Amino acid sequence: MNWTLEVVVVPVSDIDRAKEFYSTKLGFHLDHDTVVNDDVRIVQLTPPGSGCSIVIGKGAVPEMPPGSLKGLQLVVPDIKVAHAELVERGVEVSDIQVLGENPSPAPDPLDNVGFVFFADPDGNAWGVQQISSRR
């Protein structure tokens, strides 16, 4: 049986500001923005190539303090290209960091150990890791 992670709820204080950040600055695809009534709104966005989406909203999503989600992680095949793309889009992102020792530094020494970090406008913390191929 497959168990797939499909949605992660990201707590935000301003739905429109977060929607703009994730869609414009990060390039996530806007799957839907559903307003049920004044108290219920659900916005789903998906990172390019991902099978897992994020949901921001109010009413029908679990209540968590905005900015309290830490350790979310995206994976890209080239951390240098990802870093340049984030900088170009105006995201405040860390320099590329090497965390740990790569047990297989070929074909690229940044595989598995190359990371950058950023936060959304509420302080939800994200990491981006380079994994160019899964063996």
Image: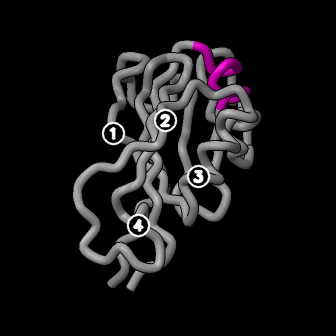
Residue visible at 51% across and 72% down? Answer: 132
Q: What x and y, as percent, mark residue 54?
A: 54, 44
Q: For the residues labelled 1 and 4, say whether their Cβ atoms are less than 8 Å apart.
A: no
Pick the front one: 38 or 32: 32
> What is the chief secondary structure element of the magenta stretch?
helix
Instruction: Give the CA distance from mark 2 to mark 1.
Output: 17 Å
Q: Decide whether residue 55 is among the magenta residues.
A: no
Give the residue type that dot 3 points to: Lys
Q: Percent from the top left, x then y, of residue 65?
A: 36, 17
Q: Which mark is residue 80?
A: 3
- Which residue position is annotated with label 2? 95
Indicate left or right for 56 with 19 as reference: left
Name the kind of residue labelled 1 in the image.
Gly
Q: Decide which of tag 2 and tag 1 comes sooner along the chain.
A: 1
Residue numbers of the magenta segment: 14-21
Q: CA distance from mark 4 to mark 2?
A: 16 Å
Q: Secondary structure at mark 4?
A: loop
The residue indicated by pointer 1 is 71
Of labels 1 and 3, the one closer to you: 3
Task: Give the CA distance from mark 1 to mark 4.
Answer: 23 Å
